[in-house]
Image (cartoon, rainbow, N blue to C red):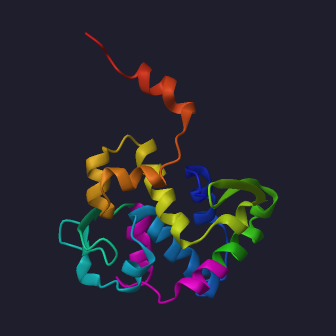
Amino acid sequence: MQYLSEPQLKELRNFKLPEGSSFDKTRDLWLFSAYSGMRCGDIQKWLPSHVTSEGVIKYKSEKTKKNCAVGLNDVTRSILKKYDGSLPKQNSALINKNIKEVLRKMKYDNIMVNRVVSIGTKDITHVIPLSDAITMHSAKRSFINLMISKNTQIAHLGTMIGNDVKSLMVYYKDDTSQIKKVMDEIAFI
């Protein structure tokens, strides 16, 4: 499963789409997930009352049945402001169709990625455009990788999205380019 990097998320946020169009709403829903970690099913059940007076989104995950809490940030706050505290309604099939089209418009069909498909005990790798690999579920993966890149503690991340550590590691794509930075920031006594 693919995800968008932080620079790609920023590019998607800034990409011009007709205001109020189906594509604009899809982008907002996808970004809301990518910056909150909320699953599509949880977003579809969004209520403005999920936001506390302290600016924390609190909800019970439909999938894991766990209580989740994640703070609002500039992106989620601006999306909620755009829709007066609500979120637009779209089903996952439409979101998946539209996000692929938005990414094609952004020329993400020129970025090739590996998609590994397991058949029995055999893994088969296909090279496909990034635009075709991204789904609504990729937004959650983007959130997890973004939060880990920002040094969020795994326990906190689990509380944000309602996953245990083992489940989180399924979503995380190890970025070995950060290993030297991580070690350089550790002071040993």
Hey, which quadrant is residue 18 in on the image? bottom right
> Which quarter of the image is occupied by the N terminus?
bottom right
93 within the magenta span: yes
Instruction: State left or right for residue 63 relative to residue 106.
Output: left
- Residue at (67% x, 72% y) in the render: 16
- Residue at (58% x, 51% y) in the render: 5
- Residue at (35% x, 86% y) in the render: 45
Q: Position of residue 7 (x, y in %)?
A: 60, 50
Hey, which quadrant is residue 11 in on the image? bottom right
Q: Does residue 144 lie above or below 187 as drawn? A: below
Range covered by the magenta-colored residues: 74-97
**Farthest residue, direction left:** 53
Q: Position of residue 150 (x, y in %)?
A: 41, 43
**Farthest residue, direction top:** 189
Query: What is the magenta segment's predominant secondary structure?
Result: helix
Q: Position of residue 127 (x, y in %)?
A: 78, 56
Q: Of residues 96 and 84, which is closer to you in this image?
A: 96
> Which quarter of the image is occupied by the C terminus?
top left
Q: Position of residue 9 (x, y in %)?
A: 57, 58
Instruction: State left or right for residue 48 relative to residue 81.
Output: left
- Residue at (29% x, 64% y) in the render: 162
174 within the magenta span: no
Instruction: State left or right for residue 105 relative to residue 38.
Output: right
